[in-house]
Amino acid sequence: MINAIKKRRSIREYLSDTIPEEKIKEILMSAMFAPSANALYPWELVVVKDQDTKELLSKTTPWSTHAKDVSIVIAVIGHEQESSNWIEDCSIVAEHIWLEVAEQNLGCCWVQIRGNNNAEKDVKEILNIPENLRVLCLMPIGIPVKEQPEHSEDKFEKTRIKYEKYK
Ligand SMILES: Cc1cc2nc3c(=O)[nH]c(=O)nc-3n(C[C@H](O)[C@H](O)[C@H](O)COP(=O)(O)O)c2cc1C
């Protein structure tokens, strides 16, 4: 198993340091390697470094306060009209980003935007995203205050796995 899978945790406390450009490039590259249904790639990313914009984004849901404390926030945008699988494709993009962040010993924590009351409308307004596009989530990324424990084999829950047939 690749180490990043165990290392990936939700980090919500960050130092104020900025992430170097080459690391941001690697994180964006990881998104490009994500699979996509029918190879449609119905997604785009908005990378936000501006502090005022991050503050605004951090107020879009009750669970996004950490977005003001990070170096960058990446908004994952979906083209709903291009693919009925936009949610799946955007989710895999977000997970690729999260795994690359873990690989680099940086921190991230998914902020759900789609379906979260007014959050999607608010994020679209803040980032000038056209009406016909969707916002799946924000990925705030920064330097963690402290390391979180890696996931361990204790997480294996036998009852979640069925063999051959469900019953
Ligand atoms: C689809 C999805 C939405 C999530 N939304 C939020 C969120 O809005 N705010 C937040 O702080 N964490 C959010 N999380 C992080 C989860 O709370 C976290 O993944 C879960 O508690 C397991 O912890 P771990 O990521 O450290 O393994 C979200 C995770 C997923 C997969």
Image: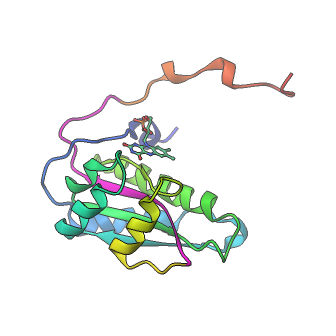
Residue appearing at x 42%, y 72% in the figure: 124
Look at the image and tell me whether residue 163 can be seen.
yes
Image position of 36 (left or right of 155): right
Look at the image and tell me whether residue 106 can be seen.
no
Image position of 144 (left or right of 7): left
Estimate the x, y position of residue 131 in percent, counting from the top left.
Answer: 51, 78
Residue appearing at x 36%, y 48% in the figure: 103
Estimate the x, y position of residue 114 in percent, counting from the top left.
Answer: 51, 58
Q: Is residue 138 magenta?
A: yes
Quadrant for the C terminus in the image: top right
Image vertical order of residue 38 relative to residue 130, above or below: above
Colour convention: rainbow
Residue appearing at x 46%, y 56% in the figure: 113
Task: Out of 103 and 73, give the one closest to the viewer.
Answer: 73
Q: In the rendered structure, which segment of residues is drawn in magenta?
A: 132-149
Estimate the x, y position of residue 59 in percent, counting from the top left.
Answer: 29, 55
Task: Out of 86 and 29, give the one closest to the viewer.
Answer: 86
Image position of 112 (left or right of 81): left
Image position of 144 (left or right of 63): left
Residue appearing at x 55%, y 56% in the figure: 91
Q: Quadrant of residue 121?
A: bottom left
Residue projecting furthest to the left: 16
Q: Quadrant of residue 29?
A: bottom left
Q: Is residue 154 magenta?
A: no
